[in-house]
Amino acid sequence: MSSSYATPGSVRVPPTTPVLDSVFGRLWPDPRTPGRPRLLAAALAVALLAATIVPFREHGLAAFLVLLAVSGVVLTAGRRRFSTVRVGSGILCLLLMSTVVIRDAGWIVALCLLAAFAVGSAALTDGRSVNGLVASMVTVPVATLRGLPWLGRALSSGAQPAAWWPAVRTIVLSSALVLLFGTLFAYADALFARWVDAFVPDLTFTSLLVRGFVFAAVLGLTLAGAFVAVVPPDADRLSLPPAARLVRRYEWAIPVGLVLATFAVFLIAQLSVLFGGHDYLQRTTGVTYAEYVHQGFGQLTLATMLTLVVVAVATRRAPRQTAPDRAVLRVLLGLLCACTLVVVVSALYRMHVYQEAYGFTRLRLLVSVFETWLGVVVVFVLAAGVALRGRWVPLASLLSGAAMLLGLAALNPDGYIALNNIERFEETGKVDMQYLSGLSSDAVPALAQAGAVGLACADVARMREREDWLEWNLGRSRAYDAREGSAGSEGAAEFLVFPCG
């Protein structure tokens, strides 16, 4: 008689799907990619370096070295073919990160680092569509969760003492020797002791908390970036599929045509003001020309953005099977984009007049760059409309926006703002001294060159002593030199002079 019970060895346990694989599904599969203990060790080393040299220092050389180290770990983790886009994106990221050691203005440094993160994420995931690019920027934070199984495999693969003991023994011996000889040389030479102080952290309770936070943050960022490089998600899977139903030609052409007619009426109004002159404007509207050009910049910027949405929706839903369909699509959307470019020029002109009247500020300069970037995106859309193929537009827009931010950083925005406000004072006698004195050290050389000794010395307390070499920053270094050269100068503009120190 056969037994109704199977032997334990004959029982088949169905394979279980890991929880994270079920959550992420086909969007981000992880086919049990082998863990890499060396990557983990490199990430730990970078995190230790960051916790040692970054806290309690202003952004400068130390921060740049850590950013380079993080990027190096992520780059070596990928082991992928270097395409033209990846190489170009890598160079752009490097230049954007370099602003941390070139500019003192925190606002432009922060924007450049965010742009470097966006460009680098797109390069790691090969995102091309709008949704794919947005998803690529989320992958690194999400990788701190998705990469946990991979991290576990890296830890377990090197869990045997035989694998770790040689490395631990080498680290302990090297640390002991460096500590011994470093202590002897520090007591023997004052300059060497100062260099040692730059690396030896102050280990108070508060310092340990801050350094522990920096260590954990940099370690998580490095490991997450490495996991994305090793197991990149299919970011473009989130791109919208082709429209399920195309509309008839008149269903999209009439709304777009009405928008185009509205643009045309607006442009006619602009031409009327241009040829009618100030008297015609005041006689018909009751406002002066100065009031007229000061209004509407925000509305025109919003109109530019909405036009891009209209073009995207029309391109998605409009039929293009026949030659007449394609011709109507090209003509209407091409004319709409051309009119939008005129609106961009009008908005930029209004902002220029506004700055000339009320002064230059960071926000006004930044929104002018943003409006210019929208104009560049419109040009990309126009170019894509010729062949009715625009898959390259989202990535080109991202890269061009990052490049424009880099150009703004190269311009030295705080110095540009200071210099233009000084020139405006010479013409109008008006200036906001409080705003100028609140600019970063990047503005000091421009102020000193213009004879504004007081403002150039406004930040003397922070720059009284040169920082250590790990805190070196080109903007602050140039400010210090300019202040030293102008503090004793004579003939400075009286309205800008107030006591230094």
Image (tube, rainbow, N blue to C red):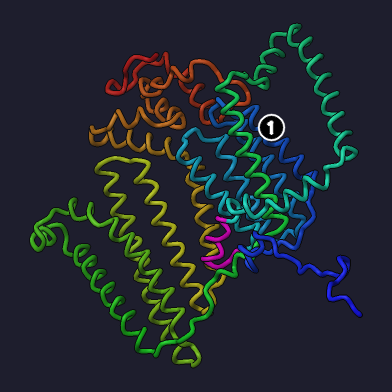
The x, y position of residue 438, in whole percent, is 36, 29
| Residue found 38% across the figure and 81% down from its top | 332
| Element on which disc 1 rests | helix
Name the image quarter holding residue 297.
Answer: bottom left
Residue neighbourhood size for the residue with mark 1, other residues' Cα within 10 Å, grouped as few (<14), some (14–19), many (≥20): some
The x, y position of residue 98, in whole percent, is 59, 40
Residue at the limit of the structure toward the top, as seen here: 188
Q: Is residue 378 above or below residue 332?
A: above
212 and 501: which one is in front?
212
490 and 230: which one is in front?
230
Residue that numbered label 1 is attached to: 48
207 and 313: which one is in front?
207
The answer to whether 343 appears left or right of 89 in the picture is: left
The answer to whether 196 appears left or right of 425 in the picture is: right
Residue at the limit of the structure toward the front, as seen here: 1
The x, y position of residue 242, in whole percent, is 52, 80
**Number of numbered callouts drawn:** 1
Name the image quarter holding residue 247.
Answer: bottom left
The x, y position of residue 275, in whole percent, is 20, 65
User: Which amino acid, mark 1?
Assistant: Leu
Q: Is residue 132 magenta?
A: yes
Q: Which residues are magenta?
A: 127-138
- Classify the position of the N terminus by image quarter: bottom right
| Residue found 13% across the figure and 60% down from its top | 281
Q: Is residue 436 above or below residue 320?
A: above
